[in-house]
Amino acid sequence: MVKIKITRGTYGFKQDGGSISPKTVKDPPFEVDKKEAERLITLGVAARVDDDGGGEDNPPYDKSMSLKDLQKIAGDYGIENADKITTKDKVIAAIEEVLNG
């Protein structure tokens, strides 16, 4: 099993009893089988997270980076129109909102 976090859209998570529950960027990380995790990560709708909730696949970012680099990272996290965000602080806030739900 692999722990992932949804970074874009809504995922229909099939629970043990067979019921489906929606998972979005606001939900905490959850576990899926390795094949499903790879599929979702490849589609760009999820990121793998390690046990402390930090991302293994999450690119590092900080305020010393250029606005353009931060916008690209925000886009990698699935933030729509990231290239239209006009300040570093706003881009970082958007990234952190995705990561922290």
Image (tube, grey):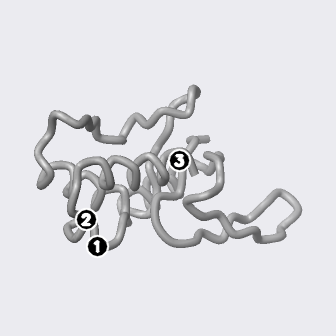
Cα–Cα span, label 3 and label 2:
34 Å
The answer to whether 52 is drawn above or below residue 83 in the figure is: above
Q: Are marks 1 and 2 in contact (CB under 8 Å)?
A: yes
Q: Position of residue 26 (x, y in %)?
A: 61, 58
Q: 32 or 44, which lies in front?
A: 44
The answer to whether 24 is drawn above or below residue 93 in the figure is: below
Q: Residue furthest right?
A: 17
Graded by Cα atoms within 10 Å as few (under 14), some (14 to 19) or many (20 or more), the crowding at tag 1 reads: few
The residue beneath circle 1 is 81
Q: Position of residue 92 (x, y in %)?
A: 33, 47
SS under mark 1? loop
Q: 22 or 97, which lies in front?
A: 97
In front of the other: label 3 or label 2? 2
Q: 15 or 94, which lies in front?
A: 94
The residue beneath circle 2 is 85
**Residue at x 54% of width, y 47% of height:** 4
The answer to which of marks 1 and 3 sits earlier in the sequence is 3
**Residue at x 60% of width, y 49% of height:** 33
Q: Kindly identify the amino acid type of the residue bearing the numbered disc 1.
A: Asn
Graded by Cα atoms within 10 Å as few (under 14), some (14 to 19) or many (20 or more), the crowding at tag 3 reads: few
Cα–Cα span, label 1 and label 2:
7 Å
Q: Kindly identify the amino acid type of the residue bearing the numbered disc 3.
A: Lys
Q: Which mark is residue 69?
A: none
Looking at the rendering, which quadrant does residue 81 occupy?
bottom left
The answer to which of marks 3 and 2 sits earlier in the sequence is 3
Q: Kindly identify the amino acid type of the residue bearing the numbered disc 2.
A: Ile
Q: In the rendered view, does 12 fall on the left or right side of 71?
A: right
